[in-house]
Image (cartoon, coloured by chain):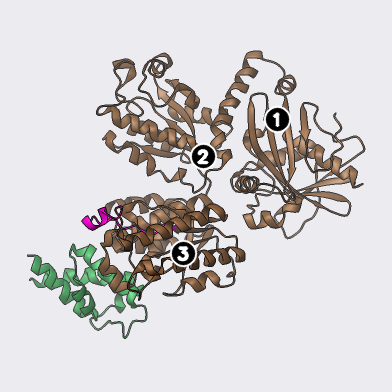
Amino acid sequence: MSKAKKEDIRAELVEIFSTVLEIDPSEVNEALSPDNCENWDSLRHMQLCTAIDESFGIALSMKKQIEILNFDLAIETVLEEVCGKG
Amino acid sequence: MKVNQSVLSIPEIRAELQDSPKLMTYLKAGRALKNIGGTLRRVRIVSSFTARGLEPYLRVEAALSNWAIEPAFYEYGLWQQALLDDPVDPAPDAYVLLLHAEEFSPVSRSMLSTLEATKTGIVSLLRSFRTRTDTPIIIPALPEQRAISALGFGLGGRLPSARFAHEVNACLRDLAASVPGIYVVELPPAVEIYPDGMDQAALYTTMSPISSKHAAQFSEMIVRALSGFFRPRKKVLVTDLDNTIWGGVVGEAGAACVAIGPEWPGQAHKLLQRAMLDLSETGILLAINSKNNEADAREVFETRSDMVLQWGDFVARRINWTDKADNILSIAKELSLGIDSFVFIDDSPVECARVREALPAVDVIQLPENPAHYVQALLDCRGFDTLTVSAEDRNRVESYKAEGKRREALENVGMELSDFLASLELSICIQTLSDQDAAQSLFDRVHQLFQKTNQFHLTLDRLTPGKIGARRANLYAVSLTDKFGDYGVIGAFEVVHGQQSLMLSNFLLSCRALGRRVEETIIGFLAEKARHYELDSVSAVFRKGPRNQPALTFLQDFGFEERNGDPGTDKKTFDLAISAETPCYPKHVKINTPGCVNTAKKE
């Protein structure tokens, strides 16, 4: 996994998170989570998962969906899925 | 992604969704649409599960159907309460009730054990709801499980849990048949809630059985079911002939060789004809617009027994070498309809582009390359969407055909207009809605006229069924017949008694009744009424809109004078003095006014 690829994934995730959560892209950082973001409720969480699935062409399992507890974990999860796909 | 909050148009959204029908596109477009203004239709979504996720999809789909939605959702678990609550203010324009069978009996061992209680409960809930508000409520039928099972075959194909949905649906349909304003809509299996148990995962994680995969399609169907309430339905389908309703070019192949069923590709064209005939039976007028020699085209209709559509099914025909946009304008003039009520269907990208450019108000269906997809292309056109088809709608096609005969009679005889009108043997019936026996269909038709009439409509007030009910004592419906046929109910007006004058606070006539001096007859009727009550004038309220100049012209030509003042309102009042002799009824009409004051005098 190249660093460049990780940066691409991060950039796409920033767009997804800022769009779904209706926040400025500058507010998206690794620690962003339902604990510090008022808009991140269960509905938006599912929308995040849907947008991630659609954007990266993956299908997160329910277990992985539940494990996305913050933005950093979202990057890690997508990286794993994308690499896993080869 | 191009969609952002500052640049946005419906064609752009459409193109964007075609490229990328994804949640992100819906979210961005949905939010951008929040800012474009226009009349927002408030729709309350009451659901037995969490439905808030539909919001962006509903916004975008409504925009694609040419109206704007402001959806409101209830919290999970509150759907019964939502129906029992006092009406909210401002009142919503429609309710949508989304039910999911699992929620009815979450803890019982067998769903069927709760069937009777469920049915009784939901009927009394909806009846009680109806006593609080007359806002329409749309209920998609519960999905009936179609999982194939050997066990199911012996039970008439239905396992007990599937029977639950089937029986609740039957009960809802019975209710909808007897209670006005309740509509049970069938969704295609592909977009049913929770189809074939395929989105269990979505249900467990979000408490919503509608997966993201189905949210867009599901929202489209809800919006299309609602559209009939919120935007005028298209009235005319103008069709090309060659490579559209039949395969091949008749001028080259000859009538005997164009393709029309039962083999490929004739079958595809035949099915398109059938779909057009279906539309015609719901009141959509069909017209031909084709570059051909008329004799060649006509030969197909006369000699091919496999044609579904007949020559007489079309209310207007332009088979010539004239520009197709000009032909549409000429058909619009002939039918006295605005071109924004037209849909044009053609296989040629060039003709489609020409009509789109020349007449942006016309909806254009460009047929796809493969005739197998023709019917779907027609069904995808949202302009024809409606939940209700009234008797008037069904009569419309016959009525326009009769109009064609009237026109021919006028052209052939070449007589004076007054002689022509006299020869029509017009008969006008003015009926009060205050009569307790007034049929529901009459109310429905008056409501429809208030929604749809744009040209001869003095105030452009769009009275709701509730307001029509509340003001029935002052409302009248006008119907018209002549020797060629029955026009049905073609107008309505509202009269309020003032101190010195009779106030015509609403007055509208369908454009197909114009030119018959019906409007003069109504004023004659009011004059009689004014004399009866010893009032000295009739006043009319007018509010200018984009297309109701004909109504204003009538008032002015008839001698109504604008009253000075009326500050602070966009409505103007016009007065007409009443004398012992004038105005009176035009002499070419017979008037029938059951239950009304009538001392008819002729001019």
Magenta span main SS: loop
Q: Residues within 10 Å of mark 1 (few under 14, many from 20)?
A: some
- Residue at left 26%, top 67%? B200
Q: Do dots 3 and 1 share one subunit?
A: yes
Tell me if residue B478 comes above or below residue A58 in the rendering. above
Which lettered chain is shown in brown? B
Closer to viewer: mark 2 or mark 1? 1
**Residue B396 x, y percent position in the rendering:** 56, 34
Direction bottom: furthest residue: A35
Residue position for label 2: B341
Instruction: Determine which of the numbered discs, if any, sits on residue B516 in the image.
Output: 1
- Residue at left 73%, top 34%? B428
Gap in Å between the C-alphas at discs 3 and 1?
Answer: 52 Å
Tell me if residue A62 comes above or below residue B194 in the rendering. below
The magenta region covers: B140-156
Chain of the residue that carries numbered disc 3 in the rendered image: B
Tell me if residue B380 comes above or below residue B90 in the rendering. above
Circle 3: residue type = Lys
